[in-house]
């Protein structure tokens, strides 16, 4: 489908469908004057077919698609930051736990005792042992 063949809002619709898998291109497209001027019906059709449920909900609620999309991007970025922080904290905790396990191994404590005290899995214990061996 070649969107350029159309002079109606179908052009915008087909352009948006071509960008479904490319967030960068979709961002650029949403920022164009053509998309700011779309009718409510065209905006709803695009929001529905992009398969972004949050966007569809916002447009259905009367919000302009371009504005709704910008707000969703902000929300997604915030969620990504929160997820990254959470992952960083969990990674940090995992590293601390690994260090504790390694120290307990170096002190000669029994594997069963280490697993019971640290609540580590066999995989975590094995990882700690491998790391000690690699340092030697």
Image: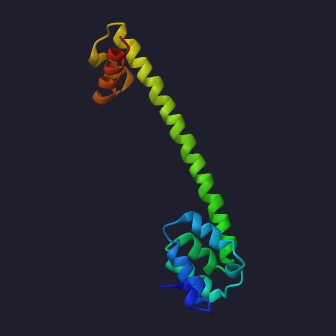
As drawn, the residue found furthest toward the top would be 107
Q: Is residue 101 left or right of residue 84?
A: left
Locate residue 119: give its quadrant: top left
Q: Front-most of 64 and 112?
A: 64
Q: Residue at x 67, y 65 (%)?
A: 71
Q: Residue at x 35, y 27 (%)?
A: 120
Compared with 36, 118 (above or below) is: above
Q: Position of residue 40 (x, y in %)?
A: 65, 86
Q: Position of residue 34 (x, y in %)?
A: 69, 81
Q: Residue at x 55, y 44 (%)?
A: 84
Q: Position of residue 82 (x, y in %)?
A: 59, 47
Q: Is residue 17 left or right of residue 37?
A: left
Compared with 58, 108 (above or below) is: above
Q: Is residue 84 left or right of residue 33?
A: left
Q: Front-most of 53 and 24?
A: 24
The figure's colour scheme reads: rainbow
Q: Front-most of 26 and 67?
A: 26
Compared with 135, 78 (above or below) is: below
Q: Quadrant of the C terminus?
A: top left
Locate residue 8: give its quadrant: bottom right
Number of numbered discs on residues: 0
Q: Position of residue 130 (x, y in %)?
A: 31, 21
Locate residue 55: give its quadrant: bottom right
Q: Residue at x 38, y 14 (%)?
A: 135
């Amino acid at each position: 489908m070649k969107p350029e063949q159309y002079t109606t809002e179908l052009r915008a619709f087909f352009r948006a469908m071509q960008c479904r898998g490319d967030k960068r291109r979709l961002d650029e497209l949403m920022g164009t004057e053509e998309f700011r001027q779309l009718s409510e019906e065209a905006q709803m059709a695009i929001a529905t077919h992009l398969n972004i449920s949050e966007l569809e909900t916002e447009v259905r609620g009367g919000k302009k698609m371009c504005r709704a999309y910008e707000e969703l991007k902000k929300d997604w970025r915030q969620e990504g930051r929160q997820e990254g922080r959470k992952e960083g904290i969990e990674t940090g905790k995992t590293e601390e736990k690994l260090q504790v396990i390694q120290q307990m191994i170096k002190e000669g404590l029994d594997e069963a005792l280490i697993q019971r005290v640290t609540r580590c899995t066999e995989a975590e214990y094995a990882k700690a042992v491998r790391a000690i061996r690699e340092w030697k």
